Amino acid sequence: MKNESFAVYISIIRKYFVSYCTEKISNFGVTYTQLFVLIYIGKNNECSPKEIVEYLKIDAGQLNRILTKLLEKDLINQRKNNNDRRFNVLSLTESGKNIVQESQKLFYSWDTQVLSDIDENSIQELMNLMKKIIFKLNEIDGGKQNEQIKRFYEHIDR
């Protein structure tokens, strides 16, 4: 990797992915960030805003604006936590669940297009390396997200 940066490659891939998603999800009536909030809520069935802030690494003010929009669009439900009424619990409405399901199709379509010229063994090796990198990043970050990452992988492993 002489004179090459892994970070640059990741940034380029992310740029293409965000561009692809932004174009395709405009039909869903949500933004890229709103979509990932919906996906997080869907993967966890119910969660708190604090969990979303920690996992997606967005500030609470931004999340509050996103949640307001998602509530207005009837994509999420918000109720008080039964154990501690000071906190809210978020879940998806049927419309929100439909968007999450459609987004999964969108992601797999992108994967298929981008990885079409790569053999299955190389794809599996790439996925395994990406998982190792994610777990290393989590370790560097203090290990806060281990359980969340494991739950996420339970849903995306092929």
Image (spheres, rainbow, N blue to C red):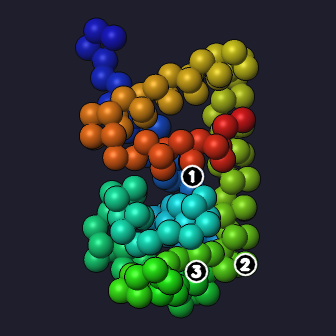
- Numbered badge on residue 88: none
Check if mark 3's residue and mark 1's residue have beta carbons within 8 Å. Answer: no
* Mark 1 element type: helix
When asked about the image quadrant of residue 39, the answer is bottom right
* Mark 2 element type: helix
Quadrant location of the N terminus in the rendered image: top left
Q: Nearer the viewer, mark 1 or mark 2?
A: 2
Q: Which residue is mark 3?
A: 76
Across and down, in percent, residue 69 comes to: 48, 84
Q: Amino acid at mark 1?
A: Tyr
Q: Nearer the viewer, mark 3 or mark 1?
A: 3
Going from the N terminus, do you reach mark 1 or mark 2 first?
Answer: 1
- 108 sits left or right of 79 in the view: right
Looking at the image, which residue is at 72% across and 62% down? Answer: 102
Q: Which residue is mark 1?
A: 20
Q: Amino acid at mark 3?
A: Ile
Q: CA distance from mark 3 to mark 2?
A: 9 Å
Looking at the image, which residue is at 64% across and 16% down? Answer: 122
Q: Which residue is mark 2?
A: 94
Callout 2 environment at 10 Å: few (<14), some (14 to 19), or many (20+)? Answer: few
Q: CA distance from mark 3 to mark 1?
A: 24 Å
